[in-house]
Image (spheres, rainbow, N blue to C red):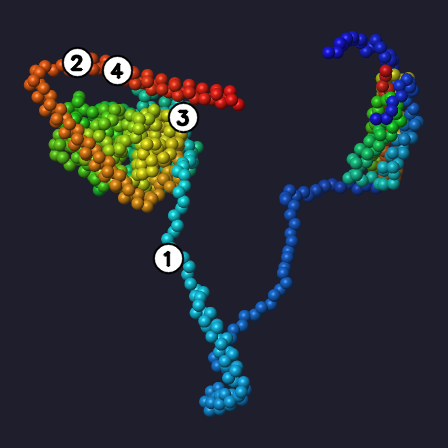
Amino acid sequence: MEEYHPGDEVAFNPDEASNSVKECIEGIIGGVDYSQNKVNQWTATIVEHSLTQLVKQGKPFKYIVNCAVMQKSGAGLHTASSCYWDTTTDGSCTVRWENRTMYCVVSVFAVAVAL
Amino acid sequence: MEIVYVYTKKRSEFGRQCNFSDRPAELHVDILPDPSLAANFVERDPCDVPTQCTQEMSEHEVNTERFEHETRGINHAEGGWPKDVNPQEMEQTIRFRKKVEKDENYINTIMHLGSLMEHCIKQNNAIDIYEEYFDGEEVVEEAEEQPSAKTINVFRDPNPVKRTATSLSWHPDRNRKLAVAYSSLEFQRTTQDMNYDSYIWDIENPNKPEMTLKPVSPLVCLEYNPKDSHILIGGSYNGQLAYWDTRKGSQPVEMSTMEHSHRDPVYKVIWLQSKTGTDAFSASTDGQVLWWDIRKFSEPTERLVLDPSKKGNLENALGAISLEFETTMPTKFMVGTEQGLVVSCNRKAKTPAEKIVCTYSGHHGPIYALQRNPFFPKNFLTVADWTARIWSEDIKESSIMWTKYHSANLLDGCWSPMRPSVFFTIKMDGTLDVWDFLFKQNDPTLTLKVCDEALYSMQVQDNGRFIACGSQLGTATLLEISSGLCTLQRNEKALATAMFERETKREKILEARHREMRLKDRSRSEQSKEDDGNMDGEESAEEMLARSEKEFFEMVGAEQKKKEKEEEEQLDKEEEEDYFE
């Protein structure tokens, strides 16, 4: 387990998180087209890698990572979320990524482990 | 031991305060539909997806290299002559021969070839390669195997109220079917809802009987007609007899009239050997043995009252429980009675008094089974009380061979049709014993616990291999015994003959000796009567009874004490062993 620094009362940094998630997505589905056989594998890998990266930051947060991959076939997709938490310490961020054949949307929610 | 102090504090009283507030809804993704993209896709409708649910197998072919072969033969009639010599012409051949013989090499080559040929001929004659080995040898006999028996099938009474299977009869051809008679022999135990039916079972199907026979009163005994396998005769609990034809259905074709039937349950009915194949006779505990012709069931053709005093008096009559009839001796038959006597009778006698020839006594209870040995008709087996006894016809005072007294009553028995020295008995504790008196005389060769309740009847098949036993709860069990017990061994007949003769002789000698002693006693007591004129020592009947009762209880008590002592010794031994361990 990564070291946890007690006494660190840091709020969630959405930019840092979104950067690391974007890198993950690029690495996994960077140059490929939508393939029905592989899409399950992709979503699982994206979620796992993103989570690993976030945890590596060593911050005292509980993370929830959600990933959706949609084929570009002319349909529309809309999602929203609402939260009830401590707005000073907790936060979320959403990363949207697309290529010619598909969209990928990853949401990260981080809830502080309060002490 | 650690001293621990536990103090509790609510989580809300320490740590960071939870200041929750609502973060309003945030739209994460808003991708608007774009129909132009849909143009890139073609709807596939219908969508056929073939699947195959089979084992995946691969096919391989292998072909070895072709080997060309041709069949050729040589027919050497005459040849070897050089081209210019015509073998038909004698002159030419003679001339050629003369020329060759003058050749130097000729003799050497001939010698060489000659010796080669001689070697081959000798080889040919030395071994006959077409010889038949093991031609005249007999089949080697199998090694002695342990006698064993195993249960093949169990046929249960399908009714909820179980009745005893009192009699079994095998189908005369091919033994594929078994007829079982069900009734309740306990006095006044028949309940209202007890079913009266008896069943014919196909031995391959133990789930459902093949045919039902519906009598008016439960059947105590049932027999297939050995001449016509569709006809069965049954004796019922109320004393009537009925016969069935399996082609005609479950109801009896005809029943004997009430007035002329027996007055007690008919315990045994046997078919007789006759030209028409329609004669049978029946026995019952009311003391009568009746002969019937099934074509005319209104009246018995003949009647015999088992009165030992030969007066035909029904009050004195002995109740008959079993019958014996051997087709090789059609004029004689035997009856086993409730009182423990076996009565031997002659069918051809003119007067009823002459019908009863002699009686054999020796049993203490009703004789449940009576059968002549199929190989030695002069000897017969009786099964009664706690023993089974073998008798010789000539000796009337006692049996020639008998088993020890068992702890449970023996209820039925029969000889094996294949081996003269093997017989079977069944007991009240549900065990089947196979006895082979050429092998072991004190104990049965094989004891088999067939079921927990008492076994009431048994019947062995004609091939001696299968035995069916019926129990108190109506379960008929089919057992197969090992081949050693149903194949005739070498010398078995001779050994059995020798054994029977020896035992008969022994009994004869004993009988003669007893008679001598009795005569001597009588003459001695007559003499002393003249001297004393007073008979003291003659106890009255009551005193004798009291004395014998006392003796009996003393013996039983002594046996019990012996058993207890044995058990104690056993426990002591076990304790000692535990102690030393």
Q: Which residue matches tag 2? A: B540
| Residue mark closest to the camera, 2 vs 3 | 2
What's the chain of the residue with tag 1? B
Amino acid carrying label 4: it is: Glu
> Residue B136: which disc?
1
Q: Are marks 4 and 3 on the same chain?
A: yes
Q: Residues within 10 Å of mark 4 (few under 14, many from 20)?
A: few
At horizontal 54% and vertical 70% (from top left) the residue drawn is: B71
| Cα–Cα gap, marks 4 and 2 | 14 Å
Residue at 42 percent across and 35 percent down: it is B150
Give the camera-side residue of B356 and B473: B356
Left or right: where does residue B73 sit relative to residue B388? right
Closer to the observer: label 4 or label 3?
4
Q: CA distance from mark 2 to mark 3?
A: 45 Å
Secondary element under disc 3, as helix, strand or loop, is loop
Q: Which residue is mark 3?
A: B452
x and y percentages locating residue B207 in the rendered image: 44, 32
